[in-house]
Image (cartoon, helix red, strand yellow):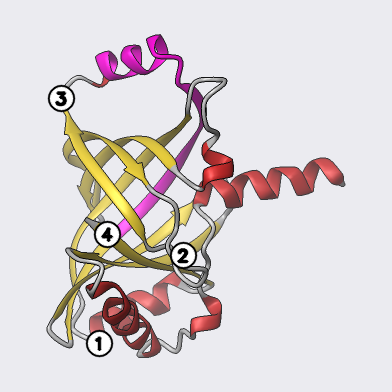
């Protein structure tokens, strides 16, 4: 599958929730994602250079009105290919649910994969039907950055769908006064590392 994804910063999540509701957005669930990124074993290709990613995710589900009521915890390992264009985060994605995260971590360690960093995200998932497309929209909060973001996603089955999907997602975002030029192509990990480097320079 090819994940067509657009990410933007927002300053007022409460306003965005209001706009989502006004535009028939359906709140589904809140999530806490703890994503641990890995790099290839030393001597092999460097994901930072190849624009690839390998991620181990712990996903906790709950209702935003009751943070203490955890509905379930799941684990996934995900490979992301290099980004296809310079305007969005569109890329090939292979996502596999795993049952034994401890054994998966042990296997990655034994194979020499290098653990890089764990990113925590607090998310609210909304779903929309727009121009006959099923669109997932996430309001994200990154505690380490103290910033809110929106991510909109669509899973394209073929490469022919990509351009049409991107246009639909940008048209969807325009409802909320979000423009193409606001699109961020860096991953959350890249944004965090970039901020850390800026602090070191100061």
The stretch in magenta equals 102-124
Closer mark to the observer between disc 3 and disc 1:
3
Q: Are marks 1 and 4 in contact (CB under 8 Å)?
A: no
87 and 197: which is toward the camera: 87
Q: Position of residue 25 (x, y in %)?
A: 21, 77
Q: Earlier in the sequence, mark 3 or mark 1?
A: 1
Q: Which residue is mark 1?
A: 22
Q: Secondary structure at mark 4?
A: strand
Report the Cα–Cα distance between label 1 and label 4: 30 Å
Q: Earlier in the sequence, mark 4 or mark 3?
A: 4
Q: Quadrant of residue 13?
A: bottom left
Q: Which residue is mark 3?
A: 99
Residue 2 bears which disc, if any?
Answer: 4
Camera sees residue 68: no
Report the Cα–Cα distance between label 2 and label 3: 30 Å
Name the residue rendered at 37%, 18% in the picture.
Answer: 108
Q: Earlier in the sequence, mark 2 or mark 3?
A: 3
Give the crowd class for mark 4: few <14, some 14-19, many >=20 residues within 10 Å: many
């Amino acid at each position: 599958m090819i994940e067509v994804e657009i990410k933007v910063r927002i300053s007022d999540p409460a306003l965005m929730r209001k706009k989502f509701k006004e535009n028939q957005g359906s709140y589904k669930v809140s999530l806490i994602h703890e994503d641990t990124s890995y790099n290839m074993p030393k001597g092999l290709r460097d994901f930072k250079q190849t624009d690839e990613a390998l991620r181990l995710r712990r996903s906790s589900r709950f209702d935003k009105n009751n943070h203490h009521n955890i509905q379930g915890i799941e684990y996934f390992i995900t490979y992301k290919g290099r980004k296809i264009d310079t305007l969005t985060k569109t890329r090939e994605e292979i996502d596999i649910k795993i049952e034994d995260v401890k054994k998966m971590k042990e296997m990655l360690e034994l194979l020499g994969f290098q653990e890089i960093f764990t990113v925590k995200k607090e998310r609210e998932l909304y779903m929309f039907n727009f121009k006959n497309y099923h669109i997932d929209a996430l309001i994200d909060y990154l505690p380490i950055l103290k910033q809110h973001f929106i991510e909109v996603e669509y899973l394209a089955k073929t490469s022919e769908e990509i351009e049409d999907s991107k246009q639909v997602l940008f048209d969807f975002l325009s409802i909320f006064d979000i423009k193409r030029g606001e699109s961020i192509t860096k991953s959350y990990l890249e944004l965090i590392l970039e901020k850390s480097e800026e602090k070191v320079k100061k």
